Image (cartoon, rainbow, N blue to C red):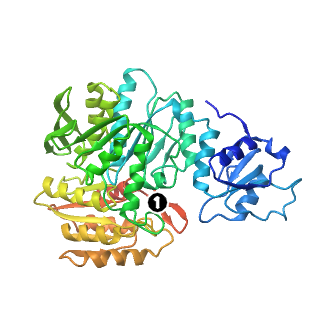
Amino acid sequence: MSNKIQSLREYVKLLEDNHILVETNAEEAQLEESVRYISYNSMDVKFGTLFICKGTHFSVDYLKSAVNEGAFAYISEQKYDLTEMKTPRAIPYILVNDMRKAMAYISDKYYDQVWKKLDLIGITGTKGKSTTTYFMKAILDDYLKDLKKPKSAVLSGIDNYDGIIKEESHLTTPETLDLHKHFNNAVKSEIEYLTMEVSSQALKYHRTLGVHYTVGCFLNIGEDHISDAEHSDFGDYFRSKLKLFSQCDTACINLDSEHSDQILAEASRCKRVITFGLNEKADIYGYNMTATGNSITFNVRSDSFDEPFKINMPGLFNVSNALAAISISYSLNIPLKNIHAGLKKAQVSGRMEVYTNMTKDLYVIVDYAHNKMSFESLFASMKREFPNKKISIVFGCPGKKALSRRRELGDVAGRYSDHVFITEEDAGEESLMKICEEIAKHVEKYECVCSIIPDRKEAIRQAIVDADRDTIVLVTGKGRETRQKRGTKYIDTPSDVEYVQEFLKDK
């Protein structure tokens, strides 16, 4: 699969038809030039590139570099002065009034709506997106193996796989141009199914604009991502997530979610609605949950089956994610035997990974939990599964986003923990110590020991050293990620899993 070569004129007309074009200075001959490549990265430019000027930290120097490397035109929300550059003729510009929408339309055209050749599964929710995504991948891969077809593709907050690219991800949902590139790679690799997390940011800022999903799944909703750079309030966050229903044929809805009536009302625009949950009224109804060691068994009843299932990871809250995957699979007519097998085999990197020392008397759980809903679910599950254990937790909060997490996570951790270790977690351009101190203010309202240890490695080491056989240690937020955002850069670091394995050897 390859994109069709289009002229610059066709892109100008596309933007004009969608009421995004402001003006262009392109001459007739320039409008007939072929757009051979599109990029927003000045390090990824070739001859015939239409360059996209985007980003908070964008500089005219990036555009100059792109032009030197072969960009023949640029699209932007403002004009840039390139008069000092010695080019044979003026570089044409295309000015737009909404760069995010423009990127979506341009990406969709450049890759010739290649997503139509895939069965796309989009999953949104405040918590559980990654786990449900990997439950689905395991189920689909088991099914595709029987058919002797390539494994399914996945785009998640953990990593991305499209048949060609396999990488650790930086965003829950890729930028628009990258998203369509992944779709294209999957089709070139003869992949039929792609499961992806669809974040509120992706829906609000049009990263998925124009893309239609075979199945859209809504897991749950709780307050998160409220900040000047994300969502102004809960209403904006919720409305953004509900946009998924305008882009899918079948909607799978968790009846246990807060605001389920409003979610169902919005989902009614879809051709088909399937409900799941621990509510007897659900089409896919889960009941009789039992946790044993690092696995959970539960029964599921639908209009066509009533039988037990098993997942091999702790955390009773994961039953809800499994029910979501079962409902999606049900809608896709995936055979039950593959659903059973996939769920049993499913492993989610960095999610509820359990590690123990040589004497098996200390347990450390590594998990991506990073917001109020996931923290509350994690602690509730730990209290139920390990009722007589003390809990220590290592976590932090990101810089300049989801600011309410500092209060919420501090409150939840302080209420349920015996010792809280606050540390680095993608502080970015904000002061790490300021973030830690803000979290600590909320932890210290409770009868809980609180330690600020900015070095994440040292924080994890100290939590393990201080723990006894009556303590469960939770290390949350980063999982198997191998980067920390410091300033505007992502710096390579060992993962939480590597730190835990290292320090447990000496315990």
Disc 1: which residue: 493
Three-letter residue code for mark 1: Thr
Residue 144 place in picture, x, y as percent: 40, 25
Q: Residue furthest left?
A: 388
- Describe the element under mark 1 as helix, strand or loop: loop
- Say which of 188 and 293 sits in front: 188
Residue 506 seen anywhere in this rendered image of the structure: no
Is 247 displayed left or right of 395 in the figure?
right
Is 487 situated above or below 151? Answer: below
Image quarter hosting the C terminus? bottom left
Image quadrant where residue 440 sits: bottom left
Is 19 displayed left or right of 127 in the figure?
right
- Say which of 226 and 419 sits in front: 226
Is 63 displayed left or right of 103 in the figure?
right
Image quadrant where residue 195 sits: top left
Q: Local crowd at mark 1 within 10 Å, few (<14), some, or many (≥20)?
A: few
Is 343 situated above or below 355? Answer: above
Residue 278 place in picture, x, y as percent: 18, 44
Is 457 situated above or below 146? Answer: below
Q: Residue furthest right?
A: 88
The image shows a total of numbered marks equal to 1
Residue 221 place in picture, x, y as percent: 31, 55
